[in-house]
Amino acid sequence: MPKRKRVVFFISDRTGLTAESFGSSLLSQFPETEFESIKHTFVDNVEQAKVSVVAINKASEKNKVQSIVFSTLVEPTIQKIIESADACVINLFGAFIDPLEKSLNEKSAHTLGRSQDVIGKLGYEKRLDAIDYSLAHDDGVRPDQYDKAEIILVGVSRCGKTPTSLFLAMSHSINACNYPLTEDELDVDTLPEVLLKYREKLIGLTIQPGRLSSIREKRRPNSKYASLQYCKNEIKIAEAMFQRAGIPFFDSTNISIEELAASVMKSIGNY
């Protein structure tokens, strides 16, 4: 049975990351519906809000069903314009500001970009440093600097190491790097020598062979590297390597990057 389809708009007066992250988490609870996502960012004046309303209404009319809108707009006037659209509009800030004002006995500032101030107090510079570290140490680059890593993700090629490393850096300010197990290293069947002294930092990632083959096929069609049997063999050897070394490992096949990162954090006692 084909999935139902709905268009989802994420409307924000800044980058839209909060609206998209929160909204996507809510939508993940509805697996029978397929969602098409559209972001409208830096909607911080009446004219831009009206442009968004036109786009929302067109989508609702075209699909003959109301679009869904997640907004994180601080300015009430702009929010009201968005709420005039032919859509199911969910005001993510509005749902929480009122009860917080009552609990804190303080009126909210209704100021754009205030979250940046809070992030700074909680370690904004540390987060930037973690992102820089993750990018500079992706895919086995500079293993001589692994002493500065907090987590080293290990696994076969294309099993999800890079996006997980970056998510750990961006969301948790963790110095995370990743190391790909090459064909030669898998032939030896033991942990690469460069990783041995960092064993307590190692986290393995694995993936189902069929999924890995599908991902690799897009990168190198009809190659040995992408064949199902080759993928099965690599994964089998890698998982056996993790087990012998006593390294925890997680399957990235059917879980979101957020869930995968949370599992990694729990394994090191930071979640």
Image (cartoon, rainbow, N blue to C red):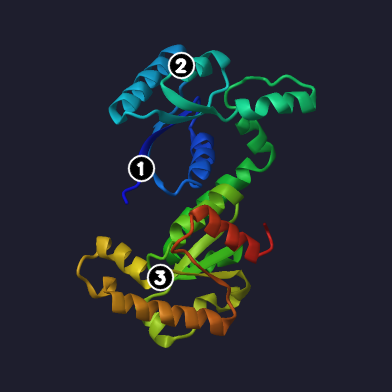
Residue in front for this viewpoint, 225 or 26? 26
Nearer the observer: mark 1 or 2; the answer is 1
Residue type beneath disc 2: Ser
Residue 53: quadrant of the picture: top left
Residue type beneath disc 3: Gln
- Residue 149 can be seen in this image: no
Looking at the rendered structure, the secondary structure element under dot 2 is: loop
* Residue 84, numbered label: 2
Residue type beneath disc 1: Arg
**Gap in Å between the C-alphas at discs 1 and 2?**
25 Å
Residue position marked by numbered label 1 in the rendering:
4
Q: Residue at x 26, y 74 (%)?
A: 227
Looking at the rendered structure, the secondary structure element under dot 3 is: loop
Earlier residue among tags 2 and 3: 2
* Mark 2, other Cα within 10 Å: few <14 / some 14–19 / many ≥20: few
* Residue 208, numbered label: 3
Report x, y in % for residue 232: 36, 78
Image: 228 above or below 125: below
Residue in front for this viewpoint, 90 or 170? 90
Image: 163 above or below 103: below
Q: Residue at x 45, y 61 (%)?
A: 254
Nearer the observer: mark 1 or 3; the answer is 1
Report x, y in % for residue 150: 61, 62
- Residue 16 can be seen in this image: yes
Q: Report the side of 241 relative to 220 (left or right).
A: right
